[in-house]
């Protein structure tokens, strides 16, 4: 009887892994580039979605979120720098309520996902700012606010150049329609005088 049960379990083991994906993909859905004030608590958090190679959501994947050990960092609601979450039927896993420390600068949340033998990983870039504003603002991951400010300044400059160029083209087009060309002004059009009719003897 014991041998029969053992054989049955051994037959089921390969079947248990048939639903596991061969490849995992992990994508950040929310939280990338968010800026938080130092010492604050995250209210929006980080959300990722785990899918297989076909884009189908993977349910029950183990997703690990890990904060840096030092520098700009914090702890999760559990009080630990690491949080483990299982993905739902939509393949999504979320963490929020992180308590940030009072060190300004960029930080990276390292995220890994596992299901069966498949593994995937990514990094979510955040920023801790000395500003009191609690509005999260997007930025380029891994870059400081100074770089972001320079990028925005360059963007404004290019927008200004584009507006100026468009205005110049418009003025040139209006001028070309309203002013006769030099070639046209230099041509004397023929004039026809009043005809005279003389009636006399042949």
Image: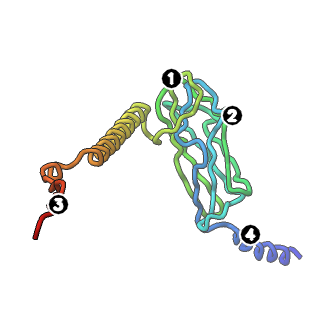
Q: Please state, as top left, top right, bottom left or bottom right, where the N terminus lies in the image.
A: bottom right
Q: Residue at x 81, y 76 (%)?
A: 8
The residue labelled by disc 2 is 77
> Could you tell me how far apart the alpha carbons at marks 2 and 1 are, in whole angstroms?
22 Å
The residue labelled by disc 3 is 197
Give the mark nearer the N terminus: 4 vs 3: 4
Whether the residues at callouts 1 and 3 have beta carbons within 8 Å, the answer is no
Element at label 1: loop
Q: Nearer the viewer, mark 4 or mark 3?
A: 3
Which of 189 and 45 lies nearest the eye of the viewer? 189
Q: Nearer the viewer, mark 4 or mark 2?
A: 2
Residue 17: image quadrant is bottom right
Q: Is residue 150 above or below residue 114?
A: above
> Could you tell me how far apart the alpha carbons at marks 3 and 2 are, in whole angstroms?
111 Å
Q: Nearer the viewer, mark 1 or mark 3?
A: 3
Q: Residue furthest right?
A: 1
> Few, some or many C-alpha atoms within 10 Å of disc 3 (few <14, some 14-19, many ≥20)?
few
Give the mark nearer the N terminus: 2 vs 1: 2
Q: Residue at x 53, y 51 (%)?
A: 122
Q: Is residue 1 left or right of residue 136?
A: right
The residue labelled by disc 1 is 130
Element at label 4: helix
Give the mark nearer the N terminus: 4 vs 1: 4
The residue labelled by disc 4 is 16
Whether the residues at callouts 2 and 1 have beta carbons within 8 Å, the answer is no
Q: Position of residue 45 (x, y in %)?
A: 63, 39
Q: Please state, as top left, top right, bottom left or bottom right, where the C terminus lies in the image.
A: bottom left
Q: Position of residue 120 (x, y in %)?
A: 56, 57
> Could you tell me how far apart the alpha carbons at marks 4 and 1 are, in whole angstroms?
50 Å
> Could you tell me how far apart the alpha carbons at marks 1 and 3 are, in whole angstroms?
99 Å
Residue 52: image quadrant is bottom right
């Amino acid at each position: 009887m014991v041998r029969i049960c053992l054989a049955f379990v051994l037959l089921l083991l390969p079947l248990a892994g048939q639903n596991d994906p061969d490849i995992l993909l992990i994508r950040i859905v929310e939280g990338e580039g968010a800026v938080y004030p130092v010492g604050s608590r995250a209210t929006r958090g980080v959300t990722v979605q785990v899918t297989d190679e076909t884009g189908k959501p993977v349910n029950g994947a183990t997703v690990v979120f890990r904060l840096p050990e030092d520098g700009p960092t914090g702890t999760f609601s559990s009080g630990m720098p690491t949080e483990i979450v299982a993905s739902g039927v939509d393949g999504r896993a979320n963490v929020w309520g992180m308590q940030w420390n009072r060190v300004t600068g960029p930080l990276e949340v390292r995220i890994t996902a596992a299901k069966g033998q498949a593994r995937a990983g990514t990094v979510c870039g955040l920023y801790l700012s000395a500003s009191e504003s609690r509005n999260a603002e997007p930025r380029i991951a891994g870059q400081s606010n100074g770089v972001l400010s320079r990028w925005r300044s360059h963007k404004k400059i290019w927008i200004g150049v584009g507006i100026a160029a468009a205005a110049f083209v418009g003025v040139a087009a209006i001028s070309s329609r309203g002013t006769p060309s030099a070639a046209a002004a230099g041509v004397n059009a023929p004039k026809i005088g009043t005809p005279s009719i003389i009636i006399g003897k042949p």
